[in-house]
Amino acid sequence: MKLIPIFKVRDMHIALRHYTEVLDFVMTDPDDTVDSPVIDLGNGDAAFQITTHESEKLFGSVANVWVDDVDAQFAKYKARGLNTSGKQNSPVEQGPFDQTWGRREFYVKDPDGNTLRFVALIK
């Protein structure tokens, strides 16, 4: 697994200048622009995303967890008792689904509002 946190930012232009001009991170997705709602940043083995898209909706922290097979990971957690009912008491915010940007994902929230987004590239 590889963990990629997502930081909420108010102004993408200001945040991007901070991370790229001051802290030596670079944009790692060639499709990202300064107007993208989510931007991938990295430096060596360090990687994270910044987003304005969800800054008002998200409570707690969010991290992407890269896995080889989203569906197998989801099935394993479900077999261990992960409540996937989709009801209010379920920590599963979203079951496995394909994103339009070529990733398959599912989201699990902890009791404090922190979310792990399990992610794999669509093959």
Image (spheres, rainbow, N blue to C red):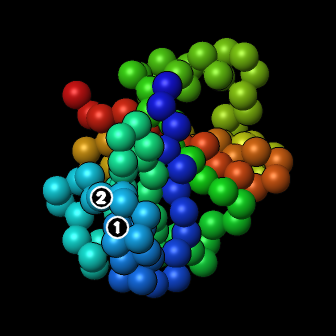
Q: CA distance from mark 2 to mark 1?
A: 6 Å
The amino acid beneath tag 2 is: Val
Task: Return the x and y of residue 84 as percentages of the image width and height.
Answer: 67, 35
Mark 1: secondary structure: helix
Outermost residue to the left: 30
Q: Nearer the viewer, residue 54 or 11?
A: 11
Residue at 61% x, 72% y: name it: 57
Q: Is residue 12 above or below residue 97?
A: below
Classed neighbour count for the residue bearing mark 2: other residues with Cα under 10 Å, few (<14), some (14–19), many (≥20): some
The amino acid beneath tag 1 is: Thr
Q: Which residue is mark 1?
A: 20
Q: Quadrant of residue 59?
A: bottom right
Residue at 73% x, 33% y: name it: 83
Q: Which residue is mark 2?
A: 26
Does 56 sit left or right of 38 as displayed? Answer: right
Q: Nearer the viewer, residue 63 or 88?
A: 63
Q: Quadrant of residue 90?
A: top right
Mark 2: secondary structure: strand
Classed neighbour count for the residue bearing mark 1: other residues with Cα under 10 Å, few (<14), some (14–19), many (≥20): some
Task: Return the x and y of residue 29 as percentages of the image width and height.
Answer: 23, 53
Task: Return the x and y of residue 39 as percentages of the image width and height.
Answer: 35, 63
Q: Is residue 86 above or below residue 96?
A: below
- Viewer can see residue 28: yes
Q: Are marks 2 and 1 in contact (CB under 8 Å)?
A: yes
| Label located before the other in sequence (2 or 1) | 1
Task: Return the x and y of residue 64 as percentages of the image width and height.
Answer: 50, 44
Q: Nearer the viewer, residue 118 or 50?
A: 50
Residue at 41% x, 22% y: name it: 69
